[in-house]
């Protein structure tokens, strides 16, 4: 009887510890996203024209600049981190996140960079982004 009680207690503590680890990982992911968001805001504060430039349509005479390209690449990488956290169960795939993705990639420069850069990303990540984007188009 005592063995059963100790076995049940150790199982409970293991489950509780696992839940605490998942909660801690979720909070760690949220802090990571906050730090990345703050860095992006700092970049935009230093380069205020960047956000309006992301709305312009790139042309042969005025293609995507290196600054624009690397900024968009940074946000795509942030999205990849978010995607991995969702896949691991550390973050939820909220409708707000999906609207944010749709809104961002609806801008001309991010759309152009994504079209070119997606071939360098993993298929499941590309499929996720394309699925989110297709829901706004239909």
Image (spheres, rainbow, N blue to C red):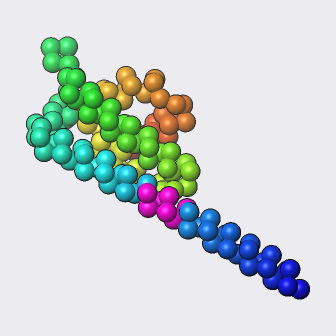
Q: Residue furthest right?
A: 1
Using the image as rendered, state which of residue 38 and residue 13 is in the foreground.
13
Quarter of the image for residue 30 reads bottom left
Instruction: State the predominant SS element of the stretch in magenta.
Output: helix
Is 110 on the left or on the right of 46, as rendered?
right
Is 27 in the magenta?
A: yes
Q: What residue is shown at x 80% (from left), y 76% (from top)?
A: 7
**Residue 124 as seen in the image, left or right of residue 77:** right
Seen at 20% across and 34% down, the residue is 54
Residue placed furthest toward the top: 60
Q: Is residue 68 above or below residue 60?
A: below
Picture quarter with the N terminus: bottom right
| Image location of residue 29, percent across then percent down | 43, 54
Which of the 4 quarters of the picture holds residue 113?
Answer: top left
From the viewer's side, name the closer residue of 61 and 81: 81
Q: Looking at the image, which residue is at 52% across and 31% down?
A: 122
Q: Is residue 90 magenta?
A: no
Task: Answer with left or right where residue 120 lies relative to residue 104.
Answer: right
Residue located 44% across and 47% down the image: 82
Q: Point out the image quarter for the C terminus.
A: top left
Q: Number of marks in the image?
A: 0
Task: Spot the residue most to the bottom.
Answer: 1
Q: Is residue 29 among what the camera can see?
A: yes
Q: Please state the horizontal and vertical placement of residue 47, each as a whole percent of the image.
A: 12, 37
* Image: 54 above or below 103: above
Q: Position of residue 63 (x, y in %)?
A: 20, 19
Name the spot of residue 86 as percent of width and height, x first: 51, 51
Q: Which residues are magenta?
A: 22-28
Residue 92 visible here = no
């Amino acid at each position: 009887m005592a063995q059963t009680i100790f076995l049940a207690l150790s199982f409970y503590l293991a489950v509780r510890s696992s839940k605490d680890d998942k909660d801690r990982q979720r909070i760690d992911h949220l802090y990571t996203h906050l730090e990345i968001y703050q860095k992006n805001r700092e970049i935009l504060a230093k380069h205020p024209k960047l956000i309006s430039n992301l709305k312009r349509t790139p042309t042969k005479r005025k293609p995507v600049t290196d600054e624009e390209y690397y900024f968009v690449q940074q946000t795509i990488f942030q999205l990849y981190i978010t995607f991995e956290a969702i896949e691991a169960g550390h973050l939820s795939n909220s409708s707000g996140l999906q609207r944010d993705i749709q809104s961002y990639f609806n801008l001309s420069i991010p759309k152009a960079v994504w079209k070119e850069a997606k071939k360098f990303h993993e298929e499941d990540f590309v499929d996720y982004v394309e699925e989110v984007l297709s829901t706004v188009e239909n």
